[in-house]
Image: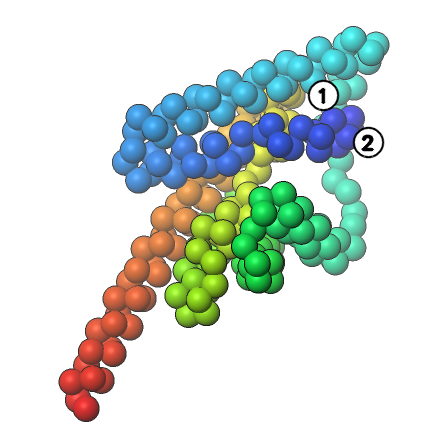
């Protein structure tokens, strides 16, 4: 098993995956200054983390090739990702001091995003699965906010957004570039496309929700006039 499986999880709070995804989203929205600064800062953090992983491996006597070997896929039961989402949701709820009665809504949005991502990954591939995950999670969070008087949409959407962002994949790709540039660059390109799909899914989800809300308002006005 690749040592990256054990080295990356303790660094999960330092991974700039959300920063990279937000930067991509801001660039897609037209905010070039803030989007570019976020992307550059996130990439620099990935380089520093990759350097730290490699330096730490060399200090304990490990060969760089052992750290950079390709990670083999792990076979697991279908319920394991669902359990991981539940555990992750509990951690986010406790760590962020989320409002009361928001846990089940947060968990609902996260599970819906996971289901959409898994289904789309089987149909269209993993690179664009984040698009469908955020496409489902974004309007669902707004519907929960407006229809059920739950916490703001940001509270229920952000955990699902963090769940979809491939932060660990970016760190693995940058780390492997130190030994195998072709494989590392290929993985980094995949991360860029994944970030772009997540950003685009968020924008399309927000636009779809606004369109749906406007159509509903017009329909209500027509019904009220008929009365």
At label 1, counting other C-alpha atoms closer than 10 Å, the crowd grade (few under 14, some 14-19, many 20 or more) is: many
Q: Where is residue 217 drawn, in percent x and y?
A: 25, 72
Which residue is drawn at the image coordinates 82% and 11% (left, top)? 60
Q: SS of the residue at dot 2?
A: loop
Secondary structure beneath dot 1 equals helix
In this rendered view, identify the residue nearer to me: 50 or 95.
95
Q: Which residue position is annotated with label 1? A: 68
- Image x and y of residue 221, in percent: 20, 78
Residue 182 shows in this picture: no
Residue drawn where x is 43% and y is 21% of the image: 40
Image point (50%, 22%), residue name: 43
Q: Position of residue 207 (x, y in %)?
A: 32, 55
Q: Nearer the viewer, residue 23 or 74?
A: 23
Identify the residue at horizontal 71%, vertical 11% (top origin): 55
Disc 2 crowd, CA 10 A, few/some/many (<14, 14-19, 20+): few
Disc 2: which residue: 1
């Amino acid at each position: 098993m690749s040592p990256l499986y054990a080295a990356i999880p303790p660094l999960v709070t330092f991974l700039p995956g959300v920063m990279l995804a937000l930067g991509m989203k801001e660039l897609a929205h037209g905010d070039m200054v803030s989007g570019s600064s976020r992307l550059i800062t996130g990439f620099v953090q990935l380089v520093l983390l990759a350097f730290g992983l490699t330096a730490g491996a060399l200090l304990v006597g490990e060969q760089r090739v052992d750290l950079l070997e390709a990670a083999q896929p792990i076979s697991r039961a279908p319920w394991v990702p669902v359990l991981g989402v539940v555990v992750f949701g509990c951690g986010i709820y406790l760590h962020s001091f989320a409002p009361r009665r928001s846990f089940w809504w947060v968990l609902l949005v996260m599970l819906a995003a996971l289901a959409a991502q898994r289904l789309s990954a089987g149909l269209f591939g993993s690179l664009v699965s984040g698009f469908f995950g955020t496409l489902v999670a974004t309007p669902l969070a707004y519907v929960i906010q407006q229809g059920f008087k739950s916490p703001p949409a940001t509270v229920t959407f952000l955990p699902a957004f963090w769940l979809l962002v491939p932060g660990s994949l970016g760190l693995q790709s940058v780390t492997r570039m130190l030994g195998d540039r072709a494989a590392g660059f290929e993985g980094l390109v995949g991360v860029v496309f994944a970030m772009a799909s997540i950003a685009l899914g968020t924008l399309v989800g927000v636009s779809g929700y606004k369109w749906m809300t406007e159509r509903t308002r017009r329909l209500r006005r027509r019904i009220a006039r008929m009365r």
